[in-house]
Image: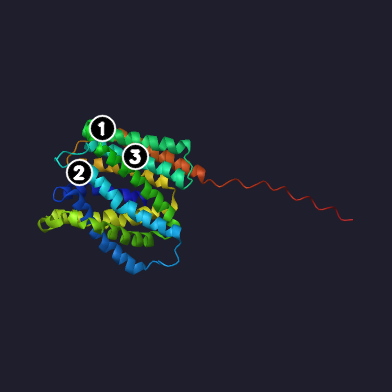
């Protein structure tokens, strides 16, 4: 399920680039969220999740996940990746990719702090290998990082906040598994996400929808139904059965796959850095997998002394 989510999100990069050419960054988020609303409405009617009997803690988890995973994360990311009022990019694309690649790292310390997941040396090594691998892939794709001057740090700061929010989404989804199953969680949180995001509709600049091309509509439908809807289900399913930091490790693959799809569909050069970075990321996943095997290994059964022989008959 984690791998299926990453496959969907890696293709989402291509569609976001396509849709950003026709709508504002806020408009992209609002449009895909409204299409996502049709998906979760059908899911809500089908599953009819219970709303009564939830404790205050349960409601805090559900509303917190809806707020963090809905308008906070998406709008922070879109604002950071967009342009300033002067039309200047707030952050270099390579730097943006590297900052967002730290989501598994933020997931690790947040899961240790709030979920009690142990951050062993193997997990730290796996996260380090994955992050270095993504950096190698990004350098090979863009050639270099353009660090912005001190007076233009709002983009990197916003991207760092988005990465931390992404880690929070994983931790909250993992914690909410005790409240709802994946289908019910997607239905309830999805409804709240759409309702919260509706407040941004007046400033989204959706007047351009009337001139949206066929490719733009295909991109918007994919991002709403698959990038948000199906991916929410697969991500929640993965987090219901695995620790948050283990599932988040797969996010490193998103950058690798996005570079691969760019090479296949957008004629973006890959070269040896892609191979080296992908090897590091896969090595990190193997280290994480062996770490999980050790943590769930069944303890050996205690030795039971053999019964004493029966006394001879008199």
- Kindly identify the residue that appears in the image at 16 percent across and 38 percent down: 88
Q: Secondary structure at mark 1?
A: helix
Judge by depth and name the residue closer to the eye, 213 or 149: 149
Percent of width and height locating residue 157: 28, 38
Is residue 272 visible in this depiction of the protein? yes
Say if 36 sits above or below 116 in the image. Answer: below
- Kindly identify the residue that appears in the image at 23 percent across and 59 percent down: 34
Say if 183 sits above or below 123 in the image. Answer: below
Determine crowd level at label 2: few under 14, some 14-19, many 20+ residues with C-alpha closer than 10 A.
some
Pick out the residue farthest to the right: 314
Residue 69 is left or right of residue 296, and the answer is left
Is residue 253 visible in this depiction of the protein? no
Which residue is label 3 attached to?
A: 102
Which residue is label 2 attached to?
A: 82
Which residue is label 1 attached to?
A: 139
Pick out the residue farthest to the front: 151
> Which of the marked residues, 1 or 3, is nearer the chain's N terminus?
3
| Marks 1/3: CA–CA distance | 15 Å
Percent of width and height locating residue 302: 65, 47
Percent of width and height locating residue 180: 42, 60
Disc 3 to disc 2: CB gap under 8 Å: no
Camera-nearest label, 3 or 2: 2
Residue 233 is left or right of residue 224, and the answer is right
């Amino acid at each position: 399920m984690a791998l299926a989510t990453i496959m969907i999100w890696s293709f989402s990069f291509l569609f976001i680039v396509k849709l950003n050419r026709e709508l504002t960054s806020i408009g992209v988020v609002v449009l895909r969220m409204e299409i996502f609303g049709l998906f979760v409405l059908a899911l809500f009617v089908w599953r009819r999740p219970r709303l009564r009997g939830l404790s205050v803690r349960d409601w805090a988890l559900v509303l917190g996940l809806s707020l963090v995973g809905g308008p906070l994360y998406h709008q922070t990311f879109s604002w950071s990746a967009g342009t300033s009022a002067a039309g200047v990019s707030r952050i270099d694309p390579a730097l943006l990719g590297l900052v967002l690649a730290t989501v598994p790292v933020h997931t690790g310390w947040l899961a240790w702090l709030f979920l009690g997941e142990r951050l062993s040396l193997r997990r730290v090594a796996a996260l380090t290998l994955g992050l270095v691998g993504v950096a190698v892939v990004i350098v090979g794709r863009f050639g270099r990082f353009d660090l912005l001057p001190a007076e233009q740090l709002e983009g990197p700061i916003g991207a760092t906040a988005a990465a931390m929010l992404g880690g929070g989404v994983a931790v909250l989804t993992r914690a909410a598994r005790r409240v709802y199953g994946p289908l019910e969680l997607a239905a309830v949180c999805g409804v709240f996400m759409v309702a919260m995001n509706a407040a941004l509709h007046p400033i989204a600049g959706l007047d351009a929808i009337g001139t949206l091309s066929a490719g733009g509509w295909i991109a918007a439908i994919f991002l709403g139904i698959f990038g948000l809807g199906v991916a929410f289900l697969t991500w929640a399913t993965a987090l219901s059965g695995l620790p948050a930091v283990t599932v988040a490790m797969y996010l490193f693959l998103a950058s690798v796959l996005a570079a691969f799809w760019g090479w296949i569909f957008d004629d973006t050069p890959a070269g040896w850095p892609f191979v080296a970075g992908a090897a590091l990321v896969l090595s990190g996943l193997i280290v994480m997998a062996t770490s999980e095997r050790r943590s769930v290994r069944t303890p050996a059964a205690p030795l039971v002394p053999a019964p004493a022989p029966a006394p001879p008959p008199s």
